Amino acid sequence: MHIFDYSFLDNGLLPTGIVNLTSTISALKALADERKNKNQIVYTQLESIARIQSVKNSNAIEGIVTTDARIKEIVEGNSAPLNHSEMEIAGYRDMLDEIHREHSILAVNEDTIRYMHKVMFNIANYSYAGQYKIEDNLIMTIDSAGKRSVRFKPVTATDTKDAMEQLIYAYMDARGNANINQLLLIPCVILDFLCIHPFSDGNGRVSRLLSLLLLYKNEYDICKYASFEEQINNTKDSYYQALYNSSQGWHENNNSYIPFMENFLMTLYKCYKELDQRFSVVNGKRLKKNERIEQTVLNSILPISKADICEFLPDVSVTTVEAVLGRMVKEGTVQKLGQARSTKYVNAKYLKQEKPQ
């Protein structure tokens, strides 16, 4: 049986890339928090956008879809769900809202995890809502010819309760270790949860909700303003490959958490990039074209290219963008990085912030 032990996070032997990416995310968090404090109205609008995207994408990953119009109506509570898919969508909405609202009083334990599952399936009135699986399950894959094969064998139904207990105990032990970076601990816990696969259905969605709760517990509220679920869905092939790579040898305690950790951290990094983009768009709606270009660059924590700016501001010509960027470089408010097609621009005050490679 798998032994749940996160002490390897305390041995100082983690890849340099992961350590650097973690430091970069911490720096981005500080900058984003500072900006949020000065732009509460804009962030309220961003929260509304992220909420819809999170509900839409977390369900879409599992093949539960409806139209964008229906998603918006369900999330905003303007329409009751019309079928089972929409009931599950509404259930995810309810639990997502509760995490955003009550994360400070939700403990990270088995009761909370089962509660997440129960809320998710309450509206659909499933009999197994909030209950661990009573039959063994398999994670399957289907090739292009329609042939099914076993991708991973989770913990058996008989051993699920014990495995979940051990997972929580290991998390609590690591959580109390001041030498363990908690941001690195989160993806390890999520990977183990997915390998246990404790429920007959809904494990992926619960894992994403649990990720948000764990991030909140470590004072990362980025997923309230930029959808973590959307970033996973945008690159879900990479996500599933990382999950597969890190689950190999899991039962024998020979697996590596590194691929899944890297994917998790890059997803979080992309959330900050998405927050930058949406902040620039929402914050610049009432500005003149020149001012919108300036604000798009200055409000971006991350280096931004001319193509990025044109994508954010489709009504602004390339010539105008080039003229404004040229002036800002001369004035010293932004600095130019790279050459030719790789050229990007960054607010001078952010230049010293590290970027992941």
Image (cartoon, rainbow, N blue to C red):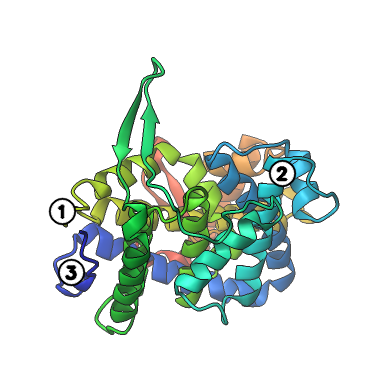
Q: Residues within 10 Å of mark 1 (few under 14, many from 20)?
A: few
Q: Quadrant of residue 9?
A: bottom left
Q: Is residue 286 left or right of residue 281?
A: right
Q: Nearer the viewer, mark 1 or mark 3?
A: 1
Q: Secondary structure at mark 2?
A: helix
Q: Is residue 255 left or right of residue 144?
A: left
Query: What is the three-letter code of the residue carrying label 3?
Result: Phe
Please report the residue visible at 32 percent of the width from the left and 64 percent of the height from the top: 163
Residue toward you, 357 or 327: 357
Residue corresponding to mark 2 = 86
Q: Residue 8: give its label.
A: 3
Label 1 to label 3, Cα distance in Å? 16 Å
Residue corresponding to mark 1 = 252
Label 2 to label 1, Cα distance in Å? 40 Å
Residue 326 visible (yes or no): no
Q: Secondary structure at mark 1?
A: loop
Q: Residues within 10 Å of mark 3 (few under 14, many from 20)?
A: few
Query: Which of the marked residues, 1 or 3, is nearer the chain's N terminus?
Result: 3
